[in-house]
Structure formats: C-alpha cells, structure tokens
Amino acid sequence: MKRERLVRMALACLVGLIMAAVIAWMTIRHDQRQAAGVATNVAPASIGGPFTLTTHDGRVVTDKDFVGKYKLVFFGYTFCPDICPTELQTIAQAMDLMGDSGADVQPLFITIDPERDTPPVLADYVKLFHPSIIGLTGTAEQIAAVAKAYRVYYARSQGEPDPTQYLMDHSTFAYLLAPDGSFVTVFAKGSTPEQMVEAINAYRSRGR
C-alpha cells in the first residue's frame, strides 16, 4: 500500500510538472508575440497618416519629408518619469545594433504634451538617447490630429497641486512604418532592441 501511494504521488507530481510546463510554454509564447508587436487585429490602413509638425531644431516638416525611410514612431513626453525613457532607450539600442544598415531608419519621438515640450525642450531631451532621433511637437490641434491618425490615447492627469508638474497618461506602443508611409507593425512595451531589428530586417527582405 505504501509503495502504491508513493507511485500515485510520483505520477501526480509528473502530471503536475507536465501541465505546468505546458502552461509556462503557452504563456511565454503569448508574451513573445505581444513583445514582438504582433498585431493581427489591427488593419494596416488604419494606422498612420499625414501630419505637419515642428522638429526639435525648429523646422516645420510633414510626413512627406520622411518618405523613403522606415519610421520608428513613439508618442510620449519629456516629463515622463519611466516609460518614455525606457522605450526611447530601446529604440536607441536598436539603432546602435543596426549600425550603418540603420541609415534607412528614422526614429521619431512625437510629444503628446506640446504645452511644455517646446522645440528647445525636445532638443535637450532627445540628445540624451540617440543622435538620429527627431523630436516633433506642434500645436495642440496638430498633436491631436497625428495622435488620432496613429490611434494613440493620451490624457492629462487631473488633480495635480502644481499645474506645471502634471503627468500624462498615454499609449506605449512604438510603430514601424514602411518607406512609403504604410503601416508595418507595432512593438508593445517591453519589446527588445533585437526584436525591433529583427522585424525591420524581415520587412526589408520582403522588399517593403
């Protein structure tokens, strides 16, 4: 009886370990797909569009100025305490990994806080991450229009005691657009530089 009990316990443990392994594998696969920016439920034509904004060095540009390059687009703000610096650092590392082959990739940081993020403020901010990153700002209306085109959510937090020290809630995706401006994919928060480079190289190989 004791031996049978031990056998049953051993079988139960084995089954439990197998089930745990299967669940862990499914969870990892799900997380990998999320981190890689898999967006099968997003219609390609529904992301992106024309815009007119001002660069961190004061130039007025439109989406047409970036035709011919892949665009890595991230929406955030310079007062962001954690997510924005982390994601911009990831983009910067992806650019470093690509080296010279990244000459056809243009990272764009579009502020969702134009009230505080003037061109000089953006200039000081983006240089902390990578020389290739262009900061973009504009009027409240221009920012609202480009955010709508990219389906970006943002909102100013309420109830801050100091009206100049508010935080912003916002989407945390980085968007990859093809040289012709068409939507390619999104990278969820937590994506790695390697995943970004892999995705760009994959679309390059397809002639996108």
Image (cartoon, helix red, strand yellow):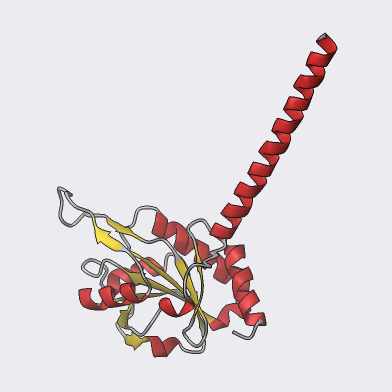
Which image quarter: residue 204? bottom right
Residue 17, how many percent across, how many down?
A: 71, 33
User: Which residue is nearer to you in this view: 97 or 32?
Assistant: 32
Task: Classify residue 70 as left or right of residue 155.
Answer: right
Q: Is residue 139 visible?
A: no
User: Given the current orientation, which residue lies at the most extreme right position?
Assistant: 3
In the image shown, does 169 or 7 lie closer to the viewer? 7
2 in relation to 94, above or below: above
Looking at the image, residue 185 lies above or below residue 51? above
Q: Quadrant of the C terminus?
A: bottom right
Pick the front one: 141 or 33? 33
Does 65 sit above or below residue 6? below
Give left or right: position of 105 versus 6.
left
Q: Residue at x 32, y 72 (%)?
A: 147
The structure residue drawn at horizontal position 40% and vertical position 90%, both measured from the top left corner, is 64
Residue at the outermost top position: 1
The location of residue 73, given as percent across then percent down, is 44, 73
Quarter of the picture containing the N terminus is top right
Q: Position of residue 102 (x, y in %)?
A: 58, 78
Residue at left 63%, top 69%? Answer: 198
Count how many numbered circles sit on residues in the image: 0
Q: Do we see residue 188 in this rendering? A: yes
Query: In this picture, is 37 found above or below 54?
Result: above
